[in-house]
Amino acid sequence: MSVILKNTSDSTIYTFPGGVDLVEEPFTKRLNTEPRAYAHGGILVSDRKVETRFIFLHGIFGKASQALMETELNSMKKACYTEDLRLYSTQNEDDFYKVEVLSFESTFLGKIGVVEINVEFQCADPFRYAKNPVTTDSNTVDESPEAFTVSNGGDIETFPVITWTAGAAANFSKVRIANAEDGAKYFEYEPAANITVGQVIEIDCQEGTVELDGSDDISHFSGSFIKLASGTNNITVTLTGTSGTNVAAFVFRKKYL
């Protein structure tokens, strides 16, 4: 098993040498019945909160010389103290944790080129994330109201990016999107001029941004950015004006406890 550190672009910045492994697998669900508060809002799971995770690495490895070992340790420390780290294990290589280092200890074991290391990472954001965003099957919207489902295969709610592409004969002044599984929350987007064929609306419910053809248009948004619950989400779209034929795509990253 290998342990790999990557950046937010999913580019590998360091692969730990053989002999360095996870002390305890962090892939089980971690729940706590005590009330807790987190910067991301203290996600509620039934009547329990999700705990902070701690991931421990331990290993003993060697190099042919002290110089090579010092170079390796320097690279390892620089990688561990990089901001916005993602930790992957080849045992679960399709998922990652967002981590930050709490402690890094290294001890030479008598021989010049042999070192023991202990590294402790904290996951203040305790969820496990799917490596790749998931795009649902594109949903055709050619009537109003239009109902369809979006399936979230993760076991915790997540915020989607909704990309709306106006198609043939579209000429509408407002779009309303609601999710029955998010407490029937909805948002409305009513731009300054009607939406017609070829125009693209992008609503990022995670970052709270709205763009029309690549330009900020948050001033014409009202309501709530919606979440996708775990499982099947019943989405309803209502248009004001001529529907035409449109495509609504939901892009999101699955999350796990």
Image (cartoon, rainbow, N blue to C red):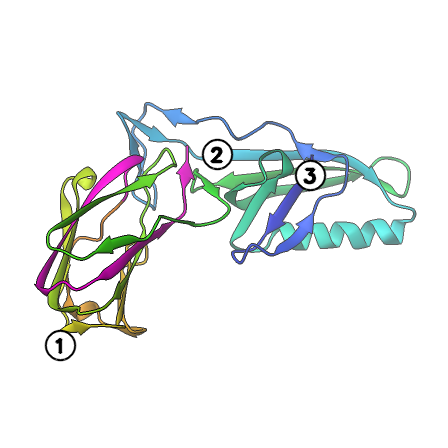
Give the quadrant of residue 42. top left
From the image, which quarter does the C terminus lie in?
A: top left
Whether 239 is drawn above or below 65: the answer is below
Q: Residue at x 53, y 30 (%)?
A: 26
Q: Which residue is more in the foreground, 237 or 88?
A: 237
Q: Amino acid at mark 1?
A: Ala
Q: Residues within 10 Å of mark 1 (few under 14, many from 20)?
A: few
Q: Residue at x 31, y 48 (%)?
A: 159
Residue that badge 2 annotates: 53
Residue lying furthest left in this view?
240
Name the disc covering residue 2, or none.
3
Q: Is residue 5 magenta?
A: no
Q: Secondary structure at mark 3?
A: loop
Q: Which residue is more in the foreground, 37 or 241?
A: 241
Instruction: Give the mark nearest the N terminus, 3 or 1.
Output: 3
Q: Secondary structure at mark 1?
A: loop
Secondary structure mostly seen in the magenta stretch: strand
Give the quadrant of residue 207. bottom left
Q: Amino acid at mark 2?
A: Arg
Q: Nearer the viewer, mark 2 or mark 3?
A: 3
